[in-house]
Every structure is written in structure tokens, then in C-alpha cells.
Image: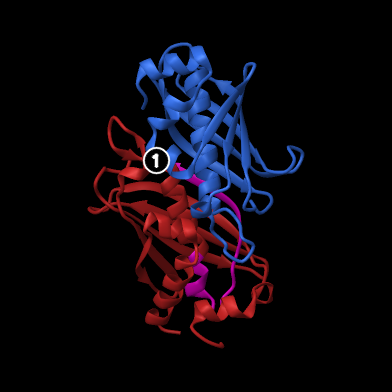
Chain colours: A blue, B red
Amino acid sequence: MTDPEILRYTRETGDFSRLIASIPYANFIGLQCNKFGDDLIFRLPAKEQNLGNPVLPAIHGGVIGGFMELSAAIYLMLAQETIRMPRIVNFSLDYLRAGLDRETYAECQLTRQGNRVANVIITAWQKSRSQPIATARAHFLLEG
Amino acid sequence: MNDQIRRDRVTRFIETLNQARELGLSVTEATGHSLTLCLPYSDRIIGNPATGVIHGGAITTLMDTTSGSVMLCALDVFELCPTLDLRVDYMRPAEPHKPVYARAEVYKITRNIIFTRCEAYQEGGETVANCVGTFMRIGPQALPTAYREQITGGPA
């Protein structure tokens, strides 16, 4: 998925700009990532093109899903010792609240890492972490 | 309601969704129980630059939009139904430079919930992904009249 050199650079510097620039879909939705100590927080700044429901208005549910899915893949890439590219197998998404037209955050947790499959839980929120807008669970296949 | 009306309603509806417009989604077919939308290939939604394969997120949006719009075909009165949950299984990467289609159908409508299933595929019929979803019925009253009329094409 991504150039090993970029991955190495991201891991060493905590600067995600090159990694994100290398993934067109990340730029398409405007995904950002920041590192705080060992923790990664993914951000999706408010963007008009990402909206779905024009009445509220709210972020398109698919964009929230794509944001969480891509966050999980990047998280997993960086959590690996070796350079193994995760391939998504499936994705289960619960929408808990409307994602309003404001910045959205996501964090990931590696629930189980097997030899070939990893299970990742993703939580997305806006105003408060204690009020998530969506939670998701993803399985990835890890290939050498 | 005939299929042309269904098609027009869905077309007007997805035109109000910025992200659907941004992706260039369009209606391929609308019937009383199913809806097919088309996602054109674009360099902007690539997830893997080495292969040109589009990101799963674009397919999730395609399937969410198709599943979330198929009730416009199944219900006479326009209701906007927020997604409760989606489960997507990826069967194979979408082949680059070709559109992806998603065909959704409603398989159960209750007073509060709509159950859908959806398949994403490409020309030739190979399945790219499968998706089941549930949607909440918040009722037609939850929408401003002007918006409802914009979708249905007049007072209905």
C-alpha cells in the first residue's frame, strides 16, 4: 500500500504529512493524524464536500466509515514491527449520533493480533470523547 | 409510483448529498424493491497508489448511499432514514479504471426499522463487496416540507 521509506520516516518522526500525501483517498476526505506520545489521534476537519444529509447538515455516514477504516489501516501499518501491508477483510460500523459539520476525531485499539489476522476497534467522536458518534470493528489480513 | 418517478426521486435526493455529488454517483436502475447506483473510477479516491485500487471508504460510501436511498423506491412517501449500522465484507479489490456498481434491496420494513442488503460489483459481475444495513425510520414529518418537495418534485 505504501512506500516502506515513507513508513519508516513516519515512524521515526511522527510526521504523517508524507504518508497522508501518498494516499489519494486520505486527501480526498481530508484525513489528518497526530501523534501524542505513543498514541495516534486521527482527525477529519470539517469539509463541505464530506456532507450527506443537507437538512442537519451532517457528514455523510460513508465518509465517517471511510475515515474510520483508513484510520485503522494506518494505525495497523504503524503498529507492525515489520512492514506488512494490512488488507481489509470486513468492517462493522455502528452509528450512534449524527456527525455534525465539525471536526471529527478517531482513535484505534488493536484488540487481537494473530499471525495473519488483526482485529481493530475504532471509536469516532466530535465534541466529547465520552459521546462517540460511531464505533467500528475491522478485521485486516496481514501479508508479508 | 413508477420506475421513472423512483429514478427521478433518487437522482434529486443524491444530488443534495455533497459527498455523493463529489464522488459522481448516479442512478443506474430503480425498481419497486431495488436500487442500483454507479461510482465512476477516479484517481482522487485511490487507496493504494501502487495498484490504483480505490479505497474501501469510497465503496462504503457508495453502499451506504445506495442502501440509504433504496427506501425512496420502496416507500411512496419520502422519508430520510439515518443509518443505524452497516456491515461490509470485502470480497476482492475493485479493478482500477472501471466503475463500481452497488445494487441494494429492502428485505424487511417494520414500523421503526428498514433492513437492507447490498452488493457492490463490477462489469462482468464479479462481487467486490457485500453489505447489510439497518436504517431508522424517523418519519416523513421529521423533514422540512421544502426539502421533501424538492425530492418528490412537488407537493405529494
Pick the quarter of the image with the C terminus of chain B.
bottom right
Kindly identify the residue that appears in the image at 49 percent across and 62 percent down: B17
Kindly identify the residue that appears in the image at 45 percent across and 67 percent down: B15
- Residue B46: horizontal and vertical position, in percent? 35, 40
Question: To which quarter of the image does residue B12 belong?
Answer: bottom left
Question: Quick check: is A71 in the magenta stretch?
Answer: no
Query: In the rendered image of this protein, does residue B107 appear above or below residue B40?
Result: below
Question: Quick check: is B74 in the magenta stretch?
Answer: yes
Residue B117 seen by the camera: no
Query: In the rendered image of this protein, does residue B88 appear above or below residue B138?
Result: above
| Viewer-nearest residue: A30 or B37 | A30
| Viewer-nearest residue: B32 or A97 | A97
Kindly identify the residue that appears in the image at 47 percent across and 29 percent down: A140
Amino acid type at image mark 1:
His
- Residue B84: horizontal and vertical position, in percent? 62, 54
Kindly identify the residue that appears in the image at 51 percent across and 48 percent down: A63
Marks counted in the figure total 1
- Residue B117: horizontal and vertical position, in percent? 48, 57
Question: To which quarter of the image does residue B11 belong?
Answer: bottom left
- Residue B137: horizontal and vertical position, in percent? 65, 67
Q: Tell whether B124 sits left or right of A44.
A: left
Q: Tell whether B107 sits left or right of B53.
A: right
Query: In the rendered image of this protein, does residue B65 appear above or below residue A33?
Result: below
Question: Which span of residues is magenta-colored?
Answer: B69-90
Binning the other alpha carbons within 10 Å of mark 1 as few (below 14), some (14 to 19) or many (20 upward) gives: many
Residue at the spot of label 1? B55
Q: Find numbered disc 1 in the image and state the secondary structure of the residue it sits on.
A: loop
The chain letter for the residue carrying disc 1 is B
